[in-house]
Image (cartoon, rainbow, N blue to C red):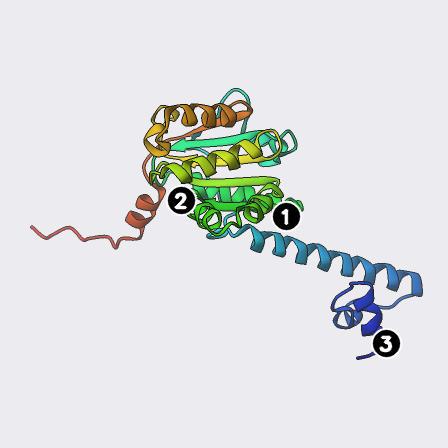
Amino acid sequence: MSRLTEICKELKIADLDSLLSEVPFKEERQYVTELMELVLDKRNTNRVQRLIKQAKFPTLKTLEEYDFTKITFPLSIDQESIVSLDFVERRENICMLGSCGTGKTSLAIALGIKACAQGKTVRFYRTIDLANELVEQYDKGKLSGLMKKISKAEILVLDEIGYVPFNKRASELLFSVISNSYEHQSIIITTNLDFGRWTEVFGDDRLTAALIDRIVHHAHILAFSGPSMRLEQAMARRPKISEEKT
């Protein structure tokens, strides 16, 4: 190990050797400045990639490729405000309601990835997966570790509430997660059910009412409409069938 490598390791500067030749030398101050800028850019890139990996998105989506035309925005927020992520600074929630395939999850992922690009911590969960993990850690006596990890995120994405009902223990633990998040984190929720039907998922009327109250108090509710995007894309990929000759 060279002395330069040892110093870089101590200063927590990675891969400096590989960057030395990427900066043209004109004079000393210019060279050091541009080299350090390159090191900083690489560090920021690595941090964003690490945040995206930690978030555990099921796939990668960007806002640039997203079609907002199927969304009805409330008076409290518009597309520009959503994309700017201003709601995160205010610890507000985003609830996305609509039928399966209307783009809710894609938008939740795209917002999460932009947040990671801004250095924010995000945790993405299919809600049924989180429910199962909460119950598993509870049974092992290790629930506090998972709750602590969730609490450190600036944005918590709970995807697909309403597709699978939860048992009593899972409902109670999910309620704890949402209660802990109240006014401390932003939650992005996707669901195919109106709030009036959430009792079908969480079971207990009082728990469901208290849970919804915490979610919607500082929330913007987006309505998604139209046919399934996945169905439309699948139909578009179908080969055209020539008209039969008469």
Is label 3 in a helix, a strand or a loop?
helix
Give me the residue at 37% from left, 31% from top. Answer: 225
Question: Of residues 176 and 100, which is closer to you in this image?
Answer: 176
Q: Amino acid at mark 2?
A: Ile
Which residue is tagged 2? 128
Residue reaching furthest to the bottom: 1
In the displayed structure, 239 sits above or below 172; it is below
Callout 1 crowding tier (Cα within 10 Å): few <14, some 14–19, many ≥20: some
Give me the residue at 44% from left, 35% from top. Answer: 172
Give me the residue at 63% from left, 43% from top. Answer: 152
N-term-proximal mark, 3 vs 1: 3
Whether residues under marks 3 and 1 lie with C-beta atoms below 8 angstroms apart, the answer is no
Which residue is tagged 1? 117
Which mark is nearer the camera, 3 or 1? 3
Q: Is residue 103 visible?
A: no
Give me the residue at 46% from left, 26% from top. Answer: 212
Position of the N terminus by quadrant: bottom right
Which residue is tagged 3? 3
Label 2 to label 3: alpha-carbon separation: 51 Å
Residue reaching furthest to the top: 75
Q: Position of residue 125 (x, y in %)?
A: 47, 46
Callout 2 crowding tier (Cα within 10 Å): few <14, some 14–19, many ≥20: many
- Quarter of the view holding residue 50: bottom right
State left or right for residue 111 relative to residue 162.
right
Residue reaching furthest to the left: 246
- Quarter of the view holding residue 97: top left
Is label 1 in a helix, a strand or a loop?
helix
Q: Position of residue 200 (x, y in %)?
A: 32, 31
N-term-proximal mark, 1 vs 2: 1
Question: Of residues 78 and 215, which is closer to you in this image?
Answer: 215
